[in-house]
Image (spheres, coloured by chain):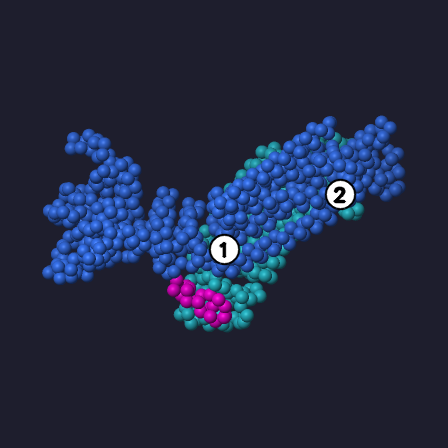
Chain colours: A blue, B cyan
Amino acid sequence: MSSIGPVKQARKALLWLLVVLIIATGVLVAGVSTGKTGAAPKLALDLEGGTQMILAPRVKGDVAISQEQLDQAVEIIRQRVDGSGVTEAEITTQSGRNVVVSMPGTPDAETRQLIQASANMEFRPVLITGSYEATPKEQRTADKDIPAPTAKPENPSDTSWITKKLYKEFEAYDCPVEVEKRETAEHDPKAAMISCDPRQGVKYILGPQEIPGDQISDAYANLARGVQGAVTGEWVVVIEFNNQGAATFAETTQRLIALQGSQNQFAIVLDGTVISAPTTNAVISDGRPQISGGFTEESAQALAQQLKYGALPISFDIQSEQQVSATLGGDQLKAGIIAGIIGLILVFIYSLFQYRALGLVTIASLIAAGVLTYLSLVLLGWGMNYRLSLAGVAGLIVAIGLIADSFIVYFERVRDELRDGRSLASAVDVGWSRAKRTILVSKAVNVLAAVVLYLVAVGNVRGFAFTLGLTAIIDLVIVYGLTHPTLMLLARTKFFADGHRLSGLDPSLLGAVPLYRGAGKVRSFNENAQENRGKKNSKASGEAAKRLTIAERRRAEANREENNE
Amino acid sequence: MNNLAEWGNQLYTGKRSYPFTQKHRLWFLIAAILVIASILVPVAKGGFNLGIDFRGGSEFMVSGVQNTEVSVGEDVVKNAADGAAATVTNIAPGTMRVQTDRLNDDQTLTVAGELAKAYQVESSEVTSNFIGPTWGQDVSKQALIGLIVFIVLVGLLMAAYFRTWKMSIAAIVGLFVVIIITAGIYSLSGFEITPSAIIGFLTILSYSLYDTVVVFDKVRENTKDFEQQNKRTFQQKVNLAVNQTLVRSITTSVVAVLPVASILFIGSYLLGAGTLKDLSLALFVGIIISTLSTLFIQAPVYSWLRERDIDVVKHNKKMEALDA
């Protein structure tokens, strides 16, 4: 075996690890200097402080929630939370069942209400249309010129719903500002309301509710058919009402078709905002109206989706709500870090005690694994928005032991090979080829555990599983890229190869006799093992053993073991 | 180090040998007693001490408290939340935990504010937590699914790697022993079962199997072609493997336990109850039991399972004949 090969190999592996570290550090430094990311890992709420709510979506009628509906639910909550002015809220789904809302600080009662409430969709007739922006003050209608309602309104389309006060409010209503605020306060279904249509850029006064959204049984985008039933190539949105909705809608269209101008329109309102306000072209008696007019396939699909929200009023039960003050979060993090450092120092001391100079390799490897973990956490926080939670910190601390075990398995194997009388360089090679298998299969178990936990787990189990899996992979990188190459190089230094007393690999301490004893005498492995056994037995039996043949000695040895039982 | 290295040498050569596989009946008996005790303890104590996550309710933590009088917190809850009963505990120096039945949003905000006033701390020192009644069940249900999926997958992985399903069986039998005994100790200590403790349990699964795989890999190596030698029986070969990896088993468990012990210590004395403490107790107990179980349960079970196999029986007969 030439010694140039392994040395070259070892240097190459070390170089690779160095390149990985330098690139990761470089990316991080670039990110930090351009202000795109912080230099520390992103922290989860339990460490940073804030509120985390775990919500279980609930559908009327106790139907199971599909993934699609869950995605809709997330979309709804995101709109609401963003609308409530909370910045940096994070909304995710968990295990295909729950919605997790995390936000800094403590949400007020209003925000909480907003998040929990179900989407509110309704159909209202349009009474009047106005410009999207507020009418400039000097152009507003004088008080005396506003027509006051003369009688009680007869039906939802009656303009008598517009009181003087409502009209004034309407003129002053500034949609760009109001939409930005995204007030989704409940509106009285029995009264008129002002609403904006951001798509068309108009605002309306709408009559009272005609049909609540939950009377929609389905909505979908479709290609329109002409009179002859041939596809015209125009996209339309088809709404299907249930029986009750169909009956009401027939009445409504009956009334609206006779009306002129904007009163001919009905508005579909979702959480207070108009998503569509089609005109009425026909009396729809079968409960299956079509909305047409300049739809692309995409916009038709989008509207159909929104209509389905209404058909499916999801509300949310708060499963768990956790508020952590920033101080407590900081304390927890501090305690976690202190525990980690104490744990590491204890491990360092123990490995020096157990492995002497070789313990330094363990320490260096652990430190390198720490650096790599740190870089990964920061970069994952930047790229994937990964946030380190307290459970994640606990996972990291536990990982110290699991990472160190790879080195222990490896070193013990090398020692075993030394005991068989190999030279250090060859013991490292043979020990590695055996330890490698053990390390790979045991890490596979760890990664498997982490992946399974991550996929099925709810709550903070995920953060824990994530760090556990991440460190198992980092462990492999370090063992291959640092520990083994370092040991290969060290095995060729005088201090280790000669088995210095403090090297941790002293063959005489390990009970080994060198393979090559000079003068061309090469000893076999088995012979050595027998000799050692003989040496350490009580003298008399040792002497007796030496007089036996090797085969006889083996039998005697086996018998002695059995007698020991 | 001299003694330790010497000990390691003796274990390696087989001069010193602990009868892990030979005395399997004794170990199995002890394990059986412990398992039965672990099942009886919770029964006798009327179940586990389930944390608030499994019962549902509201929880407040007040930190930086000077006056750790329990009645202060009880009065606050009584006045602020229509006479709701509260369990107030001084769980760590300067930290009070107040647990109540489910409070509504307004009550929660009021109680949090009043607690800060009553204990004379900033309102930012009060942490509130609300848990729906199904949350804990959800967590444990998912954990159980995870457990089953994981065990099946690891069983397959081990069977594929070691080319024998008997190792998978042995590993999984040992796994259950570890989990049941750890749960028993949990019940005995009266520690609360929280979702964090569940995470701890799941980690023990991973650790236990990990530890077993490392030892079994040596067993696989040692028992390879065991028929072709007349020095040791199959059982002795397995036992030698366990003894040869003993130094590693001890070193690894020490190294794994040290950081966990430091979390347990810091978690208990500096922070009080919480994720860290619950997690680390389960791990602390679990790591020690996992290590012991690999030595005393998994390896002997494997050797015992193989005892009836034709190749082992044949080889044993051959060895007996040689002895005679």
Q: State the extent of the magenta-drawn residues as a range.
A: B103-123
Q: Chain of mark 1?
A: A
x, y percent for residue A326: 49, 59
Callout 2: 10 Å neighbours few (<14), some, many (20+)? many
Q: Which mark is residue A48?
A: 1
Viewed as shown, does residue A331 lie left or right of B84? right
Q: Amino acid at mark 1?
A: Glu
Q: Nearer the viewer, residue A510 or A474?
A: A474
Query: Exactly how many numbered labels are in the figure?
Result: 2
Q: Nearer the viewer, residue B287 or A42?
A: A42
Q: Is residue B134 visible?
A: no
Which residue is drawn at the image coordinates 62% and 43% (left, top)? A368
From the image, tell me which residue sits under label 2. A504
Q: Is residue A15 magenta?
A: no
Front of the two marks 1 and 2: 1
* Position above or below: A308 against A6: below
x, y percent for residue A402: 62, 45
Q: CA distance from mark 1 to mark 2?
A: 44 Å
Task: Identify the image quadrant of the C terminus of chain B.
Answer: top right
Q: Amino acid at mark 2?
A: Gly
